[in-house]
Amino acid sequence: MSERTFDPERLTEATHRSVSMAAHIRVTVDVAEPGRVVLSMPKEGNTNHIGTIYAGALYTLAELPGGTLFSTTFDPQRYYPIVKEQNIRFRRPATSDVSVEMTMTPEEAAAIAAEADANGKADYSRTVDIVDAAGTVVAISTNHYQMRTHGS
């Protein structure tokens, strides 16, 4: 895993540039370190017809940490990620700002990188909870990613 340091504000800007939906729903990167990221999204501007956070905005928030975690954990000069599948379960209406945390141990990262180096790609999954301002889980998402080596 990388020992680089990361500026959450710069990663927020990079996320907004690379994924226009992230800018639209105003996602911010709050924590960015090797093996751990936290992203948040405001309720304001992301509501649906009943005044709770729109399901599509929650879906987007649940998927975005995969790219952020990738950029803090792996060498983007050697690898790039793609999302293969996402499954989300909405548990409660989100009536406040929300956040999501995604983590990966150094051992998990090393195994994924070794597989990608050997095969040109490696599949991996992350399950995340989206929580509201009170810490209540409003949605659970399992995201399936693939890391590929450049040139594969």
Image: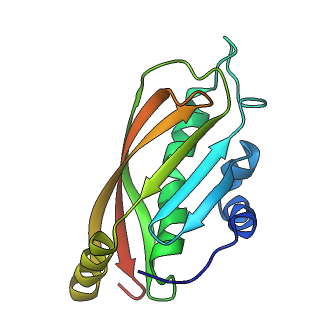
Q: Position of residue 32 (x, y in %)?
A: 59, 65
Q: Position of residue 144 (x, y in %)?
A: 33, 54
Q: Is residue 129 left or right of residue 97?
A: left
Does residue 120 appear anywhere in the picture? Answer: no
Q: Position of residue 17 (x, y in %)?
A: 73, 64
Q: Is residue 67 left or right of residue 104?
A: right
At 65% from the left edge and 19% from the top edge, which residue is drawn?
52
Residue at the front extreme of this rendering = 134
Q: Is residue 90 left or right of residue 125?
A: right
Residue 12 to residue 3: above or below: above
Numbered label tally? 0
Quick one: quadrant of the N terminus? bottom left
Quick one: quadrant of the C terminus? bottom left
Occupied quadrant, residue 110: bottom left
Q: Is residue 104 left or right of residue 10?
A: left
Occupied quadrant, residue 108: bottom left
Residue at the top extreme of this rendering = 50
Occupied quadrant, residue 26: top right
